[in-house]
Image: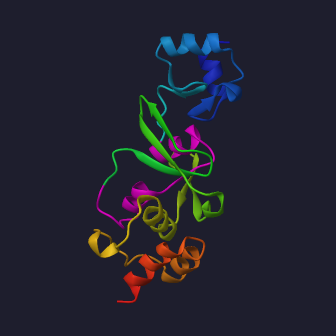
């Protein structure tokens, strides 16, 4: 199959070998020719199509959703920008290094794997990102934040009712950090 015909047959910018229904030999040739970018084993991107970082993070490892510092910065809750896209997964902690960046995945208990929304990016690909309240709870829990007063956190945009509802599923010490912040 010719490359242009193949490219036109896929509407996605990022795809797996299975979705492509092509042989690894042909994909390797197109990669060598600079027409494809190999992101990881079995996952490619068309060299001339852009993919947003958040969409790529969800595509590279599933199930997962964007959270922690990446989501908190995205929502304006913390000013610190993460150098990598950080996600949560109920499966395992993982680091995926690609030519497009480094993607970090932190494992969380299955019972705490909830509280995200599905967003459509500019190229029509969907990704999952934590709701702001869930990203904060994930951050406190996984980074073992014991006191929000010592952090540069803007909680003004958070839904307190949702935060309290979500915090019920977390250990007592996480609820304590939240309660201490709002009961001053």
Q: Which residue is drawn at 58% across and 61% down?
A: 117
Of residue 107 and residue 124, the one placed in the foreground of this image is 107
Q: Please provide percent x and percent y for residue 179.
A: 44, 83
**Residue 62 sits above or below residue 39 on the image:** below
Q: What stretch is highlighted in magenta?
A: 52-80
- Residue 14, relative to residue 170: is it above or below? above
In front of the other: 141 or 31: 141
Q: Which image quadrant is residue 109 in?
A: bottom right
Q: Residue at x 56, y 38 (%)?
A: 60
For residue 172, above or below residue 99: below
The image position of residue 105, as x and y in percent, is 50, 46
171 or 101, which lies in front? Answer: 171
Q: Is residue 93 above or below residue 34?
A: below
Relative side of 12 to 136, left or right:
right
Residue 32 lies left or right of residue 90; in this view the side is left
Q: Residue 76 colored magenta?
A: yes
Q: Does the magenta stretch include residue 37?
A: no
Quarter of the picture containing the C terminus is bottom left
């Amino acid at each position: 199959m010719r490359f242009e015909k193949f490219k036109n047959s896929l509407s996605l910018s990022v795809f797996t070998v299975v979705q492509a229904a092509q042989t690894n030999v042909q994909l390797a040739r197109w990669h060598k020719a600079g027409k494809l970018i190999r992101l990881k084993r079995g996952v490619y991107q068309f060299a001339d199509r852009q993919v947003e970082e958040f969409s790529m993070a969800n595509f590279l490892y599933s199930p997962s959703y964007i959270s922690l510092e990446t989501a908190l910065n995205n929502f304006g809750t913390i000013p610190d920008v993460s150098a990598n896209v950080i996600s949560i997964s109920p499966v395992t902690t993982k680091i995926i290094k690609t030519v497009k960046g480094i993607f970090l995945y932190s494992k969380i208990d299955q019972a705490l794997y909830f509280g995200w929304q599905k967003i459509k990016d500019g190229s029509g690909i969907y990704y999952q990102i934590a709701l702001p309240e869930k990203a904060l709870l994930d951050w406190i829990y996984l980074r073992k934040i014991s006191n929000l007063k010592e952090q540069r956190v803007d909680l003004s945009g958070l839904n307190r009712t949702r935060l309290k509802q979500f915090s019920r599923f977390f250990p007592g010490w996480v609820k304590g950090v939240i309660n201490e912040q709002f009961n001053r």
